[in-house]
Each structure stands twice: as structure tokens, then as C-alpha cells.
Image (cartoon, grey):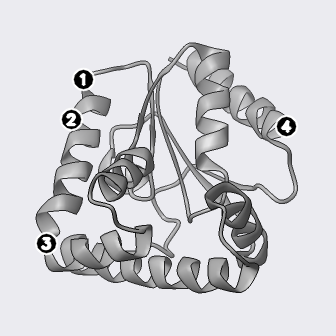
Amino acid sequence: MRITISGLPGSGTTSLTYHLAEMHRLDVISAGEVFRQMARERGLTLAEFGSFCEEDPSVDKLIDERQREIALSNTHIIAEGRLSGWMIQEADLKIWLKASLECRVRRIFDRDQFSDLTAAMQATKEREACEALRYQQYYDIDIGSLSPYHLVLDTEMWTVEQLAIIVSSAIQTLQKSE
């Protein structure tokens, strides 16, 4: 089973990805983790690294190509990332996670240890605008379009455990139809 999990920053993609990976013994390739690691290696914030990527498209394309390559070489994997559902068209199940901006900013505030919510809100808005522009320029992708996804889940409504039950049901249904 090849699965993609996508969503805007703070929507819970990483949490659900690793929960499902453990439940179903699936490998994981995470574009966000690669992106954050590359930003840290350069001593840049996510917003600064995003701006750098705007100037040098090769970084984004390298991350996207590598994730696609790994996902296609493995039939038991979850590819987690904003564009995974767009880039890995061969996936058996493509999931988009959604949550309000306010909810996502609270999660980002906690995760990334911002000094205050206003700073987290500003950084999140800048990051999302930067990413949306890059995706449009590089791939002609409107990140707001949910057209490639089979399943859209509201992470404000469900806990990660409940989301995993919903997705597991979809996985089981797909496996029965194979």
C-alpha cells in the first residue's frame, strides 16, 4: 500500500503519518522533515529557507524528486508532504488533512517554540504564501485544490487515534478490492 498524506503546516500530517506507519508497519518518507533539516543545516528559519528556495528552485525540486523516487521504489510506504498527493500520482490512497489557521498556528507555536502566537501566526502566513507561490511557479499546482485526494479529514474534529481508525478502514477496504 502506497499512501500520501498532505496538508498545510500544523495540520497534523507528521503525527498521523508516524501513527499509521507504526500501526501498519509502513516505511515513511517525509518532505517536511527533509525541508526542516535542510533549513537547520543552513542556520535558517523555515521562512528564511523558504525564501532561499524561491531563489533556487533546485532545492525544492530535489526534495520532491527524491521523495517521489523513494515512494515509487517501495510499495509499503507513506509519503508525507505538502505536494505528495500531487507528485505521487500512483499512490493507492491520497489523504489531505485540514484544520483552521488558528488551530494550526497553536500547534506550530507549541511545536516550534515561538515566543508568542502573533509571531507564529506571521511566520505561518509567510511560509504558506511563499510555498503556494513556489508550487504555482514550479509545477503549476494550486495547493488549495483538493482534486488529487481520495480522502479529506478534519484534524480539529478527530484525534490522531480516531483519524488512524478512519484511514485504516480505507486501507482495509482498498486491500480487499485488490
Work out whether residue 171 can be spotted.
Answer: yes
Q: Of residues 46 and 157, which is closer to you in this image? A: 46
Query: Is residue 174 shown above or below 16?
Result: above
Residue at the spot x=45%, y=58% of the render?
A: 82
Residue 18 placement: quadrant: top right
Residue at the spot x=35%, y=67% of the render?
A: 44
Nearer the observer, disc 3 or disc 2? Answer: 3
Q: CA distance from mark 4 to mark 2?
A: 30 Å
Q: Are marks 3 and 4 in contact (CB under 8 Å)?
A: no
Residue at the spot x=64%, y=77% of the render?
A: 120
* N-terminal label among 1 and 3: 3
Residue tagged 2: 69
Q: Of residues 17 and 147, which is closer to you in this image? A: 17
Residue tagged 4: 162
Q: Secondary structure at mark 3?
A: loop
Q: Amino acid under label 3?
A: Asp
Nearer the observer, disc 3 or disc 4? Answer: 3
Residue tagged 3: 56
* N-terminal label among 3 and 2: 3
* N-terminal label among 4 and 2: 2
Q: Amino acid under label 1?
A: Ser
Q: Secondary structure at mark 1?
A: loop
Residue 101 x %, y %: 70, 77
Q: Secondary structure at mark 4?
A: helix
Nearer the observer, disc 1 or disc 3? Answer: 3
Q: Of residues 48 and 67, which is closer to you in this image? A: 48
Residue count near mark 1 (Cα–Cα under 10 Å), binned few <14, some 14–19, many ≥20 = few
Q: Amino acid under label 2?
A: Glu
On the rendered structure, is 70 left or right of 94?
left
Residue at the spot x=78%, y=69% of the render?
A: 103
